[in-house]
Amino acid sequence: MATRAQSGTFSRALRAVAVDGTTLSIPDEEAVTWRFPKHGGPMPECGHPLLRLVALVECGTRALLGAAFGPDTTGKLSYARRLPPPLDASMVLLADAYDDAYDFLEAVTGTGASFLPRSTRKRRPTVRRPLPDGSYLTTA
């Protein structure tokens, strides 16, 4: 969707895309709660059922490229694993840091897309080679 003239859509000739998730309250009806359990308290009649939504979007335009959803009892990363098919070698994927994301990132690599996971303060990667812009190359 994006053109190179649009701000925030490309990085070093790669189309920037991101994956992120959220949860949404859905109707508290018997037709829904069999698949989407309620949350919010020790009693089953408390709270609302929640749906987990994970989406792949183009940065800048916010165009939706793919989505996966289901009960929030399944983690965000499980739904993110369903998203790699829309990715290709023209893209760089921005994503949260996941401790158990090796197979997800391996699937992304299989699409030809580059990826840039967000780091955390706990991670101290070894600097392999400093780059002129202040960033550096490292290996996991």
Image (cartoon, rainbow, N blue to C red):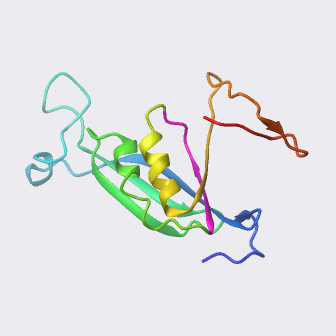
Q: Is 17 inside the magenta-drawn segment?
A: no
Q: Residue at x 51, y 65 (%)?
A: 87
Measured as percent of width and height from the top left, residue 31 is found at: 9, 54
Vertical comparison of 100 with 110: above or below: above
Measured as percent of width and height from the top left, residue 18 is found at: 56, 55
Total number of numbered labels?
A: 0
Q: Is residue 128 left or right of residue 16?
A: right
Residue lying at the far right in this picture: please name it. Answer: 132
Q: Residue at x 71, y 37 (%)?
A: 138
Q: Nearer the viewer, residue 116 or 18?
A: 116
Vertical comparison of 68 with 103: above or below: below
Q: Residue at x 20, y 37 (%)?
A: 38
Q: Is residue 91 left or right of residue 3?
A: left
Residue 132 falls in which quadrant of the image?
Answer: top right
For the record, the magenta segment spans: 90-98
- The quarter of the image holding the C terminus is top right
Residue 66 falls in which quadrant of the image?
Answer: bottom left
Measured as percent of width and height from the top left, residue 77 is found at: 40, 43
Q: Is 95 inside the magenta-drawn segment?
A: yes
Q: Residue at x 19, y 45 (%)?
A: 36
- The quarter of the image holding the N terminus is bottom right
Measured as percent of width and height from the top left, residue 90 is found at: 62, 69
Q: Nearer the viewer, residue 97 or 48?
A: 97
